[in-house]
Amino acid sequence: MTSAPAPASARGPVAAPPSADAPLRIGTRGSPLALAQAEETRRRLMTAHDLPPEALEIVPIKTTGDRVQDRALSEIGGKGLFTKEIEEALTEGRIDLAVHSMKDMPVEQPEGLVLTTYLPREDPRDAFVSLRHAAIAALPQGAVVGTSSLRRRAQLLHRRPDLKVVEFRGNVQTRLRKLEDGVAEATFLAVAGLRRLGMLDLAEAGIAPEDMLPAVAQGAIGIEQRAGDDVVSALLASLNDADTTHQLAAERAFLAGLDGSCRTPIGGYATLLPDARLRLRGEIIRPDGSERLATEREGPIADAAALGADAAAELRDRGGVGFFDGLG
Ligand SMILES: NCc1[nH]cc(CCC(=O)O)c1CC(=O)O
């Protein structure tokens, strides 16, 4: 027996808007930065749908990356460290959507989950943070710099092979204390994170992308949901930023083409041009900074992903097998 396609409401009565009794649950990491990003998402949903704050519940979730504080992130392994537990909660229906720093998101999502919404991107640049020095160029010979990012480490050593890089983990407050304690002369943080935390005054000016190419998706917040959850899709639809979507399509295709993970120093940043075009800059750097390979693509935004994949293929060929070997 055949039947007509099920109407959209076949899953039950037409969903009521989120309310204090049945709030929309927003999953996030519990760090101050992650909570600020979840709050921004909540504010945007409240404004877009005229909802009271109680209709949107923020649910903090601890991830492996939050739990493991004593080892370098690159040792524990790859991307997904900050997303796995949150995605499990989403799949199991304990939350309705998840807010992520796109920089920490693997290029592929687990079965049944989709990234549907990018908020307007914040400043993508890295910030130089130091209590004594104004910029990288002002650091004395042999100075110690703290970072846990393989990309920043490799980029820095490429420019300044004399510097010594030490592992620097923890949240912004922890890292600042380390600077005060003299563990390092300087560190780097994303301008976007500092701004969202209201701590931008800590940083000297952001570093121009020409001098330190940002990580793929740095500064962008993405919202993940269950595929086919029409209620959540409808609530999120008006929040998506088209420019950010095009930038990330190019950058994430570039990362995917390089099989990027936390273990690989990769920079990728796309900017929009007039006439619906886009420019992607990408680079790979050996972990010790000894070699940097860079490329650029320009084309219509409709080809964003193809431009990213093409740039990655070029660098893969030029770098050859083993380019990323030799992690210190
Ligand atoms: N890996 C941690 C992380 N993930 C996203 C940000 C910053 C915010 C952003 O890029 O949107 C940070 C901290 C930092 O790099 O300073």
Image (tube, grey):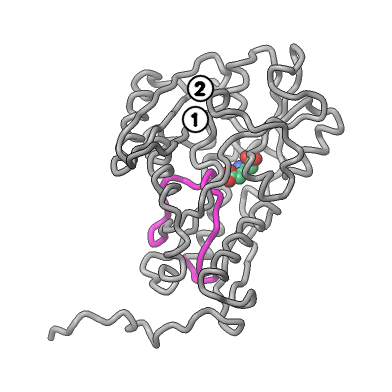
Q: Report if residue 107 lies within the magenta region.
A: yes
Q: Earlier in the sequence, mark 2 or mark 1?
A: 1
| Residue 20 falls left or right of residue 119 | right
Q: Quadrant of the C terminus?
A: top right
Q: Residue furthest right?
A: 181
Residue sitting nearer the eye, 34 or 192: 192
| Residue 183 falls left or right of residue 34 | right
Residue sitting nearer the eye, 204 or 326: 204
What residue is disc 2 on?
285
- The reply to whether residue 148 is visible in this rendering is no
The reply to whether discs 2 and 1 touch (Cβ–Cβ < 8 Å) is yes
Against 220, is 307 above or below?
Answer: above
| Residue 44 falls left or right of residue 206 | left
Density class for disc 2 (Cα within 10 Å; few <14, some 14-19, many ≥20) is: many
Residue beneath the point at 51% across and 61% down: 88
Q: How many marks?
A: 2
